[in-house]
Amino acid sequence: MQPSASVTSPKHSEKIIVALDVDSPGAARQIVDELGDTVGAFKIGLQLFTTAGPDFVRELTKAGHRIFLDLKFHDIPNTVAHAAIEAAKLGVWMFNVHALGGREMMARALESAAEYCKRQRIERPRIIAVTILTSSDANDIREIGIEAGVEKAVVSLARLAAQCGLDGVVASSREAGVIKRAVGGVFNVVTPGIRPSSETNDDQKRVNTPAAAVEAGADYLVIGRPITEATNKRQTAIEIANQISLITDPILD
């Protein structure tokens, strides 16, 4: 028996992070208002942050929304350490750095954010590391000098992030299982490149369906256009949450 499309559960919907990849705060507010508490968090990336700035991030966090700040910090360790503090000041739930920035950069980001949050007596944002972008394949990474192949590169970067104390990584769901086995413990895998089976891949190369991604080991799914461009965004998010529920809470005959 399939669950009704009008039914959802917080433990399923909280896995969904909706990407606010739009060109204005007005468009983003419309999406947030329509979805409400149907999803677990909203992602603000480079496009929206560049046009709307940190004030818009504060607006959403102060309204009680969980925000994943997806700016992929990658710079010298000192610069990233200060950026991590600023992200914490915004009240975001999670932000990311590039694992390719190396051990010192990731460790300094975590240390600086943790020290600031301890002084302020606030909860530290989750800090995760980008491994290999889901828009990249073996040919793409070979061109920049990574010969190991996508899976080996992802696992190596995930291990490094874990050693630095980070909370998880951004990776394709195709590598989620091998990451979990390689790292162990509580280590989140945040997965973009999620497409319902009826959708095109758009600019992504390593994609999966929501249910398959969760089954593979993904903890959070970053979903943009399949929800934000849907005629009924709320209903679409509920349907995806219900697809996830069939994996996490299978119905026994």
Image (cartoon, helix red, strand yellow):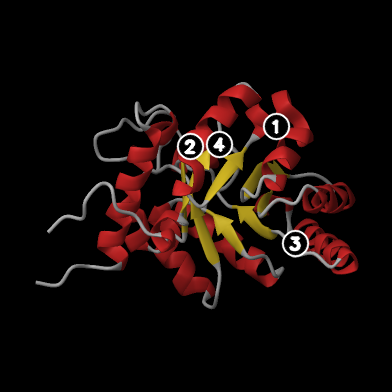
Q: Residues within 10 Å of mark 1 (few under 14, many from 20)?
A: many
Percent position (x, y) of residue 25?
65, 26
Instruction: Identify the image quadrant of residue 15.
Output: bottom left
Amino acid carrying mark 3 in the image: Arg
Secondary structure under badge 3? Answer: helix
| Label located before the other in sequence (1 or 3) | 1
Contact (Cβ within 8 Å) of mark 4 with mark 1: no
Residue that label 1 marks? 49
| Label located before the other in sequence (1 or 2) | 1
Q: Tell me the number on the disc at residue 103.
A: 3
* Left or right: residue 57 compared with residue 186: right
Percent position (x, y) of residue 220?
48, 56
Secondary structure under badge 2? Answer: loop
Q: Nearer the viewer, mark 4 or mark 3?
A: 3
Residue 209 visible: no
| Label located before the other in sequence (2 or 4) | 2
Residue 88 visible: yes
Amino acid carrying mark 1 in the image: Phe
Name, please, the residue furthest toward the left: 253
Q: Is residue 190 above or below residue 50?
A: below
Whole-angstrom CA distance, mark 4 to mark 1, is: 29 Å
Q: Tell me the number on the disc at residue 143.
A: 4
